[in-house]
Amino acid sequence: MSTASIPESSLAAGFTPEVFEEFLQTRDEPEWVTQARRDAFELYQEKLAEPLDQEEWKRVDLRALRPGKFQLQRTPAEAADVGTLMQDRAEFAGSVVHVDGHCVRQSVSDDLKARGILFGDLATLLREHGETLRPHFATRAVQAGTDRFSAWHAAFWTGGTVLFVPHGVTIDEPLYSLIGLATDGAADFSHTLVILEDNAEATLLEETSSSTEDGAGLHVGAVELLLGKEARLRYVQLQNWNSKTYHFAHQSGRVDSNGSLQWTVGGLGAKLAHIHQDVHLDGRGAEGQVNGVTFATGKQLLSYYTQQTHHAPDTRSDLLYKDVLRDNARCVWRGMIKVDKEAQKTDGYQRNDSLLLSSTARCDAIPGLEIEADDVRCTHGATAGRVDVEQVFYAMCRGLTEYEAMHMIVQGFFQVVTDRIPVELVRETLDKAVERKLGIGE
C-alpha cells in the first residue's frame, strides 16, 4: 500500500476542525499568527486528499502511523520528567528548553541581550518582537503549502526556538536548544527560526530527545535558517528520540551573497523519521556545507530527501552523509543538486556512504542532478559496504574485544564528518551521542 492510498480519516484522526478550534483557544498570539494558522489548517485539509510526492515518499511506509494516538499537551510535563532531559549546559552562551511543546527554561547572557540578540521561545518572541520576526517567519524558507506535513505543522506549531543576530554581530560561544518529549502519547510541533543579518555570525546546537525509552511520541517540526550577506552560521541538529517516536520535519536554509552555512545533522533515534532538507544559495558567492551522521539499529527507518539549489553564480555546495546500519535497520537518502540557468560557475557536490554492520540492514542512496546552466562543476557519488572482517580481526589480535573493534571502526567512519565541525564543544556532544548509540543492545 502506498502512502497515497492511506484513508484520509486515519491521517486526520486526532487533529479535526474541533480539535483545531480548541487548540486556538489555548493560544495567546497576535491576530496575524492566528490567521496564518487558519489558512494553514485549510491547506492541511486539502492536502490530506492529495497524494504525497511519490519520488520523495515511495520508500517511506506510513501505514503504521496513527495520529489519533497522539495529542498536544496543554501543560508542561512534571518537573521530575523534565529533569531527565536536561544536562549541564553552563558552557553555552545561552540555552532554551522545550518539553511537550512548552518552554520550561530559557537563559541568555546580559551581554548578548545588550547587543540586540534575540534568543528564546518562539511564541514569546513573536508576541514581543513581531515587527522584527514577522517578515521572516514561515515566509521565505519552509512553506505551509508544500505537502500535508508542512501544512499540519503550520497549523499546529506549539513552540520552538528563535535566534536573531543583528547586522555585524558575532557570537563567539555556541548556543543550545533542546526539544524534548516527556509524556507518553505527546505530540510536538516545534519550529526553529534562525535569522542572521548581514555580516553576523553564530553557532547553534539543537537536540531532540525523549525522557524515557517507553513513551510513544510524534514530532512534526520545521527549521528555517536565514542568512544575510556575508553571514556565517554553524547549525547542528542532533535527533535522538526513542524508538517509539515518529519524526517528520521540513527544514530549509537560505544563504545570501558570500554567506556561509555549515549544517550538520545527526540522525540516531526515532522509530521512523523523514526529513525534507533544502539549501538555497540565493546570492553570488554563497556557500552551503551539509554534513550528515546517521546510525540506525533494530527496525528503524531513517529517510532524508535533500536538495541543494543554486540560484546565483559562483555558488558552492558540499553535502556528505555517512550512514551506519545494524540489525534490520534501513536508511533512505534521495539527494538532488539543482542549478538555475543564471547560476554559472556553480560548484556542487554530494556524496552518501553507508557502512552495514549486518547482512539484514539495507540502504537506498539515490543521488541526482538537474542542471540548466552550461558552465558548472557538479558531481555526486554513493557507496555501500560491509565492515571489513580483516580490520576487526586485526584489532582483536591486539587485545580489543569485537565490540571495541566495531566501535573503533564506526568512529573512524564518522570521523570525516565530525572533523568538519570547528567548535570542539559541539563536536564532543555529537561524539558522545554516537558512543551511547553504539552501546544499544550490548
Image: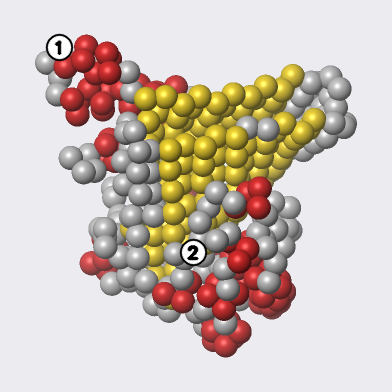
Looking at the rendered image, the quarter that the C terminus falls into is top left
**Which residue is rendered at x = 31% and y = 41% of the image?**
327
**Residue kind at label 1, given as amino acid type:** Arg
Query: Label 2: how many residues lie within 10 Å, few (<14), some (14-19) or many (20+)?
Result: some
Q: Position of residue 103 (x, y in %)?
A: 43, 65
Give me the disc on residue 155.
Answer: none
Comparing 46 with 82, the one in front is: 46
Q: Nearer the viewer, residue 418 or 204?
A: 418
Q: Quadrant of residue 30?
A: bottom right
Quadrant of res 403: top left
Q: Is residue 197 above or below residue 211?
A: above
Helix, strand or loop status at disc 1:
loop
Q: Which numbered disc, 2 or 1, marks the residue that appears first in the sequence?
A: 2
Horizontal and vertical percent position of residue 170 = 57, 36
Q: Residue at x 15, y 19 (%)?
A: 400
Residue on which the image places disc 2: 63
Residue count near mark 1 (Cα–Cα under 10 Å), binned few <14, some 14–19, many ≥20: few
Amino acid at circle 2? Arg
For the N terminus, the quadrant is bottom right
Applied colour scheme: secondary structure
Single out the residue that lies furthest toward the front.
Answer: 1
The reply, left or right, for residue 14 in relation to residue 378 is: left
Q: Which residue is mark 1?
A: 398
Query: What residue is drawn where x is 22% and y is 39%?
Result: 439
